[in-house]
Image: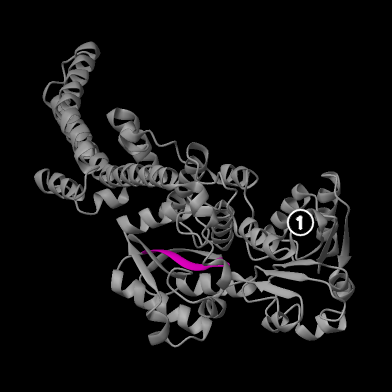
Amino acid sequence: MSVLVVGLSHQSAPVAMLERAAVTGDDLGKLLHAVNDSPHVAETAIVSTCNRVEVYAVVDKFHGGVSSISELLSLHSGIPLDELSRHLYVHYEDRAVQHAFSVACGMESMVVGEGQILGQIRAAFRHAQDEGTIGRDLHDLLQQALRVGKRAHHETGIDQAGASLVSVGLDVARQHLGPLDRVNALVVGAGAMSGLAVATLARTGAREIVVANRTYDKAVRLAADATAAGVTARAIPLADLDHGLAGADLIVSCTGAAGLVISKGQMEAAGAGADGRRRFFLDLALPHDVDPGVRDLPGAALSGLAELRTAEQAAEAIGPEAIEAVRTIVAGEVSTFLGAARAAAVAPTVVALRSKAADVVEAELARLTGRLPELDDKARKEISQTVRRVVDKLLHAPTVRVKELAAAPGGDTYADALRELFDLDPKAPEAVTRADIASEASDGGAAALAGGSGGSPPQMGTADIASEASDGGAGHIEGSGT
């Protein structure tokens, strides 16, 4: 089984195609199960954000997996397969691991270094776990990706610019409106991106922040956070959106709605174009929340994902040194992760070899007892311990060495060599349980099985992931709070 990534992002596809391919709500669960139930796929997780849709899968055949996933993405999006395929990228085995770690570090984001992707990966992990489509391989990969992402942000200056779609978008808003401490802001939605917008506007000291959301209680919580930061803020239900639009200079919208939330007609009815007020619309939703026609209104400007794609402020502020430092971290972590995976792959064969040796020892000791019944218990015990020590010493060096060799590329051949040299039953390694492997790891091979010589931390459990989610996790980025 090998890890496969099939996806499209702002780097490979136009925003219009990303809109059509976006996976939200019930559709995300349906696609998750459709992929997981398809031929050649054993595990599935889907990372879906405002600028990427990526299917992570564990497959037994490369071409079969790519074909099945591509067809399902085409079916879901309604984009013809031949058209969609031109914008899909595929990563397999080592490249899939490298891609996952780079994504978690924000290196593949529209704004390099933005940290919200960690929350999106956590959301993908939890959703796949809740739906029962994630197994050991993707569990380990996504957990390690989260750790690598956190390490990159903690140890480098990759996020020193506060780079996110929100911060870059608000920088563009300043160019149109001037200092944001003079504006009345309306934030539509109460998901991760909306929460970031409220927090950023509160730090800049906006004159007033109004939060509109379908679930009113969530809007109230966001407004309360802004009030606690010393800014005038209030919540309104989404039904009162027209009233909120009339008094707003800056409108930030990021909901999970399937259609437009703010139309040109709404804005005209709210006085836009006739009241002499300059307005800026920041549309961070996918599909779009704001009617592109609002650009035609006097005094109005609109920036969406397509415009933000060309923003270079964050990358310039980060600098090449930080980017290179992250690349170094990713390369080292990929090497360590793959080495540990290869070492773990040989462990069942090592356990099967030790099991066969133990069976031989027991059979010979039983034979000895039958031939020399006059041996007393003390002599029998001493002989037994001696034979076992001899076998353990003979097996110790080759089994430890084979784990070390297995960590290198092509290391799986050493497991094949062991099976051939010691005439092991081909099915024996498959029958080895994880408990057996854990026991073997403590017997001379713990470093390799627990993460290699690179010092990767031990694997976390579900509770650890839940804890991680509260540590900077922004949840799903497409305004899932509405």
Quarter of the image where the C terminus is located: bottom right
Q: Residue at (80%, 53%) from the top-left corner?
A: 181
Three-letter amino acid code at the position of disc 1:
Leu
**Can residue 29 be seen in this snapshot?**
no
Percent coordinates x, y for residue 356 in the rendering: 20, 39
Percent coordinates x, y for residue 368 in the rendering: 13, 25
Residue 367, compared with residue 149, is above or below; it is above
- Answer few, some or many: residues within 10 Å of disc 1's Cα (few below 14, many 20 plus, some between 14 and 19): many
**Can residue 398 be seen in this snapshot?**
yes
- Looking at the rendering, the stretch of residues picked out in magenta corresponds to 49-58
Residue 205, compared with residue 443, is above or below; it is below
Please say whether residue 57 is one of the residues in the magenta stretch: yes
Left or right of 210 in this view: 367: left
* Nearer to me, 429 or 281: 281
Residue 312, compared with residue 27, is above or below; it is above
Percent coordinates x, y for residue 469 in the rendering: 62, 48
Label 1 element class: helix
Please say whether residue 177 is one of the residues in the magenta stretch: no
Report the magenta stretch's main SS.
strand
Left or right of 185 in this view: 403: left
Q: Answer with the quarter of the image where residue 297 lies.
A: bottom right
Percent coordinates x, y for residue 252 in the rendering: 73, 66
Q: Residue at (42%, 55%) from the top-left corner?
A: 100
Left or right of 390 in this view: 349: right
Quarter of the image where the N terminus is located: bottom left
For label 1, the residue is: 180
